[in-house]
Amino acid sequence: MPNTEQSDGRIALITGGTDGLGRATAVMLAERGYRVFAGGRNAERIAALRQLARERKLPLSAMELDICDDASVDRAVAEIEKSAGTVDVLVNNAGIAIAAVMEEITLADLHKQFETNYFGLVRMSQRVLPGMRRKLSGRIINMSSIAGKLVSPLLGPYSSSKHAVEAVSDAMRLEVYPFGIQVVLIEPGYISTSMNRNAGELSSAYAKGAEQSPYKAVYQGFLNSWSKTTKSSQYTPADCARVILRAVEDDPPRARYPVTREAKIGILFRRLLSDRALDRQMRKTMGIPDFHRTSQTDSRK
């Protein structure tokens, strides 16, 4: 039976909740006794999560939700408010990643990156905050990333959107404090999910053009480093879900919860090392060529 000691049947809405970290969080909160609504866009994943909820008799509803669409957001939240009540916990988990050097990424792709990771998060928060303010309680959990603290080549688009998530969360945390609402950041390192496969698809045009790009060596260094990262990570979505559960139930919560050993080390490096030292380490890790060698190569073309 679900443990309802902490949840008291509170209503939780999770974006990107039908797969990966969001799905693991939705199931874990439902097992804890929360009335969970998991939003997503993929009909097959929505159906699969509904089936799981029926089989395990969980208080979990999977629903269609596109955080980039005003009407979809209004429709989903209105449905929750009508059928269950005011959202008590919002987990802004939906996100995408596009890997490309900043000179080459199209503005359309950059808009897409921010529309999902930043504007979608703000859109969702604005929709549930009035209800939370009326109740004088609520919690918003924003999914950031170690990439919001520590930036590597090619992840400028993704990291800049997560930097924005960090900033908006810090502002909101102070703004909503008088209303008994808490805003929390989750900062994971690499965890294998379908988001990483989707990132490969979204970034495929840049990867295919890397051979002819003046940034060929930078692309190659990133891919080599990324391959090592994906092979060495032992963390699962459930590991992140456990941290999110703690962020939901801690009273009071911390402002930030890092997830994975790499994330904790990266945050420490960012705090202790100078920009010059961090750049030097990143160039070494990513195999970025020496400036003079690159210049000489370019001059011979």
Image (cartoon, rainbow, N blue to C red):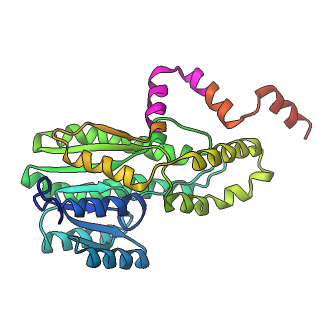
Residue 195 or 117: which is nearer the viewer? 195
Relative height, residue 216 to residue 67 (above, below): above
| Residue 116, position as x, y percentages in the image | 43, 58
For the point 64% across and 49% down, the residue is 227
Residue 34 falls in image quadrant: bottom left
Say if residue 101 shows up in the picture.
no
Report whether 124 appears left or right of 180: right
Q: Is residue 122 magenta?
A: no
For the point 37% across and 55% down, the residue is 238
Residue 64 or 192: which is nearer the viewer? 192
| Residue 7, position as x, y percentages in the image | 14, 56
What is the span of residues highlighted in magenta in the rendered image? 263-279
Q: Which quadrant is home to the N terminus?
A: bottom left
Say if residue 247 shows up in the picture.
yes
Residue 12 or 191: which is nearer the viewer? 191
| Residue 213, position as x, y percentages in the image | 77, 49
Relative height, residue 123 to residue 230 (above, below): below
Residue 108 falls in image quadrant: bottom right
